[in-house]
Image (spheres, helix red, strand yellow):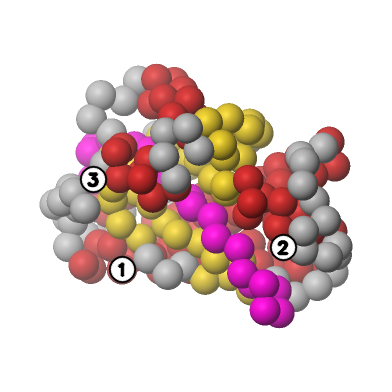
Amino acid sequence: MIENRGLTDTHLDVLKEIGNIGLGNAATALATMVNKKIDMAVPQSRFLSLEEVMELVGGLEEVVCCVNLRLDGDVPGQILFLFNLESTYNLVDMLMGMEKGTTNIMDEMGESVVKEVGNVLTGSFVSAIGTMTGLNMIPTVPMFAIDMLGAVLSASLVAGGYVEEHILMIETLLFEDNEQIKGHFFLITEQHALNTLFNSLGLSI
């Protein structure tokens, strides 16, 4: 793992707590949406290099489903929420009340479900950060894509004009009964934005 950009365990614990709050809000929203209990957890949060992100998710050519949005305001950046294809299909089955293994292709209905989940999850993270920090954060309309991981990450880095990427990974787990689905939330930003974020919480880097 790369150095955490000068961050201590305290900084990372704060990021994990933000993730937990965001996921708690998202779990409530999803449970209301599908009328069933959905639990979520954040096992870890850390900064990764681009190469480590590739390895974590499955490699350059791993096909992923991605909900992507740009953040404007005090903490500009890009947010990505990624699931691999198997997790995506399982997610659709879970939320549509179907037996695991039913979904094996991403049709219009499945895409709509995943996009809405991505909207709820990313929106909850942004709201949690804004509430805890008081910062002005303006998310754009989320976009949905199915593509190879390399293409997804490259497009986000180019769109943001990032030279020295700072990729925060917050691992997310969704539970329903005995079923578990893993996703990855990524915030790609730059050092000045991180400084703004932590200064608002009374922490310096």
Using the image as rendered, state which of residue 25 and residue 61 is in the foreground: 61
**Identity of the amino acid at label 1?**
Asp
Q: Which circle, 3 or 1, is nearer the viewer?
A: 1
Numbered disc 1: secondary structure = helix
SS of the residue under disc 2:
helix
Residue 183 — which label?
none
**Circle 2 residues within 10 Å: few <14, some 14–19, many ≥20:** some
Residue 202 vs 119, above or below: the answer is below
Q: Nearer the viewer, residue 122 or 58?
A: 58
Q: Earlier in the sequence, mark 2 or mark 1?
A: 1
Q: Is residue 168 left or right of residue 125?
A: left
| Three-letter code for the amino acid on which mark 3 is drawn | Asn
Residue at coordinates 26% horizontally, 42% vertically from top-left?
A: 49
- Please state which amino acid type lies under the numbered disc 2: Ala
Label 1 environment density (alpha carbons within 10 Å; few <14, some 14–19, many ≥20): some
Question: Whole-Å distance between the Cαs marked 3 and 1?
Answer: 16 Å
Residue at the bottom extreme, as displayed? 177
Q: Which residue is mark 1?
A: 13
Q: Is residue 191 magenta?
A: yes
- Circle count: 3
User: Which residue matches tag 3?
Assistant: 195
